[in-house]
Amino acid sequence: SPCLRLILGDQLSLNLSSLRDANLAQDIILMCELQAETTYVRHHKQKLVLVLSAMRHFASTLKECGFKVYYRRLDDPDNSGSFTQEIEQVFRRSGCTHCILTEPGEYRLQQQFAHWQDTHSEYTLEVREDDRFLCSHADFRQWAKGRKQMRMEYFYRWMRRKHDLLMQGDKPEGGRWNLDAQNRNPLPAERQPTAPLTFAPDRITRDVITLVEARFADHFGTLEHFGWAVTAEQAEQVLDTFIRERLPLFGDYQDAMRQGDPWLYHSHLSASINLGLLDPGLVIRRAEQAYRDGKAPLNAVEGFIRQILGWREYVRGLYWLWMPEYRDTNALQAERPLPGFFWDAETSMNCLHQCVSDTLQHGYAHHIQRLMVLGNFALLAGLSPAAVNEWYLLVYVDAYEWVEMPNVQGMILFADGGRLASKPYAASGAYINRMSDYCEHCSYDVGRKTGPRACPFNYLYWDFLDRQHKRLSDNPRLGLAYQNLARMKPAQRQAIRESARIFLQQLDCG
Ligand code: FAD
Ligand code: DLZ
Ligand code: SF4
């Protein structure tokens, strides 16, 4: 008998597990644009356009393949507003009672579907594993089992072996697993990365832009620069261009930042991969091939593969292992609300101004901007994890909770008390100055430690360590920092505390 196959907005892959044994002649595919999904956070306008346009393009691809597709538009007058009510409507009309779904990426939706099944025994919901990921839930649990500490590095080595990526027999290619030490160069002025490949909005995207402008005018961000890939074909072109033009230098400048250019040598593929337009396994095989063909060096290819085979799979594994308690962790008892400049970029701290501006204009900032500028500030200023999670989930076009939350709770805020990261990623202005040109254009002086002209990152860094002494001083990786703090003269420590107090007080007053 016919069955219904529901495809969520980030499941835009023809090889999706829920489509695998579809019967073209009788099965119904359901896709729905929903008020609930477009507003559970106030997503960046570019994220809304991207998801809705990619959904519409994917629906037309499915139709071309011969599927019967029932597509709900946001402005259909009788759009019921929820997945489960839409399923029930199709059931009532078609007589089918069985729905197949690839597991949702977010806990909130998994709960919603589980609750519906519990209360609707007349229907069956078959939830299949999302095998677009390279590590299944069972494999991740097996890896995690019995480990006191679940560090990414060991997971990554295990995945390299398991998937035989960049291996020479049972040894890592080149003799070392991780070439991170070769990924930390600042960007010399003469290096000019080419502009990223973008796509002028087609008819479908233009329609969605009109819809988003009208319905979500008060959401974060601007639409002017919209150029994201909205189909698998376009995403593959972005991948080709990345492998050719950016991958060779990806490793060298992975951590570098430059004013006015968030793209640098990054791939800009996260949004496409997360939506399902690009298969992560294929992406890393292509990178490995570039290395084997002598077209990109090992530090670039290893660094890139580590992000996808390592970090991306690792955070997803931890999310499902630790939800729902994970979202409520707040080990450093951070309570400060988000300062206004996170929304409008109005701050005289140039690094933050630039990173928020990039985010407003593109729904994108690269990893080090997210981690070492915005994230570092959130950590040092003691911003509330709930507020910071909400912000990261709504401002980036690639943001879904399964990947956003471990990066926020674990990587930037240390809210999980070190279950993910071995130490907080805290840094003073010197780090930002070394890795970027932001400080050259800043009204603060990165060389000064305290006082009104001093770079706030400098005193916030020491004040943070000082404030968190009880919780962090026995962390071996912070040993040196705490020794330095202990050696400071009392007057200097007092000056740091005073500068931090004034700064944070002004922050709270807006
Ligand atoms: P590249 O630098 O080219 O990296 C290649 C790929 O590796 C990315 O496309 C991505 O798929 C993967 N990757 C790299 N770092 C990570 C990581 N830490 N965790 C998971 N995957 C990673 N990434 C998201 O996809 N969605 C998010 O919501 C998200 N939120 C983040 C929040 C914070 C606080 C931080 C510090 C990082 C976050 N990241 C997130 C990870 C990372 O910053 C982005 O994946 C990356 O910047 C996307 O740009 P890119 O495709 O050019 O990446
Ligand atoms: C992110 C998003 C948005 C903005 N809109 C929709 C939508 O209208 N319909 C839909 O099916 N999915 C949407 N999504 C993606 C879902 O929120 C996504 O499936 C979950 O976040 C799980 O990862
Ligand atoms: Fe940022 Fe400090 Fe540099 Fe200004 S001086 S750009 S606040 S790190």
Image: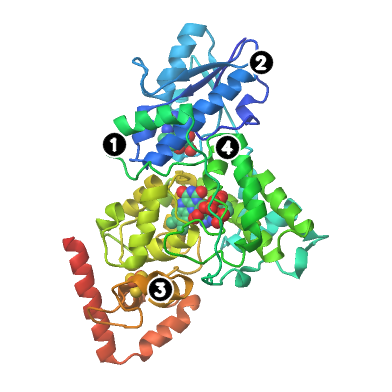
Q: CA distance from mark 4 to mark 1?
A: 27 Å
Q: What is the quadrant of the N terminus in the image?
A: top right
Q: Which residue is mark 3?
A: 472
Q: Residue at x 59, y 68 (%)?
A: 183
Q: Residues within 10 Å of mark 3 (few under 14, many from 20)?
A: many
Q: Secondary structure at mark 1?
A: loop
x%, y% of residue 378?
Answer: 34, 62
Q: Are marks 4 and 2 in contact (CB under 8 Å)?
A: no
Residue 419 on image: x %, y %? 49, 61
Which badge, 4 or 1, comes first in the chain's sequence?
A: 1
For the residues labelled 4 and 3, the Cα–Cα distance comes to: 40 Å
Give the residue type that dot 2 points to. Asn
Q: Is residue 295 above or below residue 441?
A: above
Residue where numbered disc 4 is placed? 276
The one of 327 and 221 positioned closer to us in this rendering: 221
Quadrant containing the C terminus in the rendered view: bottom left
Foreground: disc 2 or disc 3:
2
Mark before the other along the chain sequence, 1 or 2: 2
Q: Point out the tag, 4 or 2, that comes first from the N-terminus.
A: 2
Number of numbered discs overlaid on the protein picture = 4
The label shown at residue 217 is: 1
Seen in the picture, residue 55 relative to 457 is either above or below; the reply is above
Distance between mark 1 and mark 2 Cα atoms: 41 Å
Kindly identify the amino acid type of the residue bearing the numbered disc 4. Answer: Gly
Q: Secondary structure at mark 3?
A: helix
Indicate whether 67 appears above or below 448.
Answer: above
Mark 1 or mark 3, which is nearer to you? 1
- According to the picture, the residue beneath numbered tag 2 turns out to be 23
